[in-house]
Amino acid sequence: MPDQPSKTVIISGGTTGMGRAVALAQLARGNHVTVIGSNEARGRALVDQAADPNLRFLRADLSSIAEVERVVAHVHEHHQAVDALALFANRISPKREATPDGLEFTFALYYLSRYLLGHRLLPLLDAAPNPVVINVAGVGNTAGRIFWDDPQLTRRYSQVRAQLQAGRANDLLGVAFAGQVESKVRYVLYHPGFTRSGADAHPNPLIRNSIKLLARFFARPVADSVRPITGWIDRPPAEPLSATDRGKPVDLSLKTLNPDDAARLATYTEDLLHSRTPR
């Protein structure tokens, strides 16, 4: 934008759907954008379409702790500050999969990668004048919970249980992150609702085609879902934590945003990471 300096924007899961649309919108504003994705072909297609030197694509499997750390090191090497971190990476897993770190795949990709990116990039975010993290998940939805006795879902796995648990974990991630009084980062939890994006990601062709059909009639256009994100990157909210569910503010006293649960999950996550750090 001509009336403000360019910003540095990092997007996880930015090669398709809303993440891709955000990347293109930020490039159109003259911002520097790094997109992280696991699909090399989609990443290269985005680079070719944008034809913009301000775009960088990083191929990475964000379900791997080592891969997230590699991405973080790359960003630290190439940037002195990060103005916005937009978190989209997620993929449905019909069957339980274990990552190389021995973690349940959905937990690792949908929640843990977002935890790591936010915390590991915090010094660069705090170096920006008005930084913001935008976590796109399902805030406002109260279905699902953290299975404290089995967070890795080694028993009774289903893709719905895994997705809902990770969604609630992202709610709590925002609460804990915003509670860091020493940080000036603004944290936004955003539930865009059913959007015409991401249908190609489902591995089952029957379900994939059903989602596409429903999307034609009931889903919001991607541009409508992305518009608030553009606004938050331009002008981050004043509050340390804000939450929006399909255009409406979410009451932060909602049970799924409980600070005690947020602290409990943060402790579990740090212990989990410590147990998997080479000594």
Image (cartoon, rainbow, N blue to C red):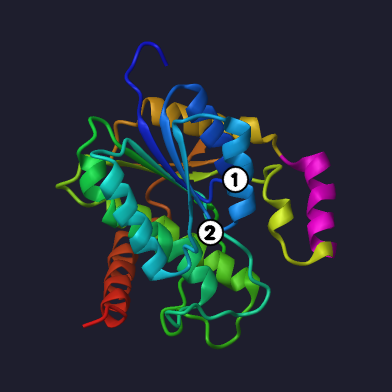
Q: Residues within 10 Å of mark 2 (few under 14, many from 20)?
A: some
Say whether disc 1 or disc 2 marks the residue closer to the N-terminus: 1
Q: Callout 1: helix, strand or loop? A: helix
Q: In which quarter of the image is residue 157?
A: bottom right
Seen at 70% across and 34% down, the residue is 221
Residue 231 spot, x, y in % from top left: 45, 27
The correct choice, above or below, for 13 with respect to 113 in the image is above
Seen at 25% across and 38% down, the residue is 81
In screen coordinates, is 139 left or right of 246? left
Label at residue 272: none
Seen at 63% across and 33% down, the residue is 49
Q: Can residue 246 be seen in this view?
A: no
Q: Report the front residue among 196 and 120.
A: 120
Q: Report the front residue among 49 and 163.
A: 49
Residue type at the position of mark 2:
Thr
Magenta span: predominant SS is helix
Q: Report the front residue among 165 and 198.
A: 198
According to the image, label 2 marks what residue? Answer: 142
Magenta segment range? Answer: 206-219
According to the image, label 1 marks what residue? Answer: 44
Residue 270 spot, x, y in % from top left: 27, 72
Residue projecting furthest to the left: 182
Q: Callout 2: helix, strand or loop? A: loop
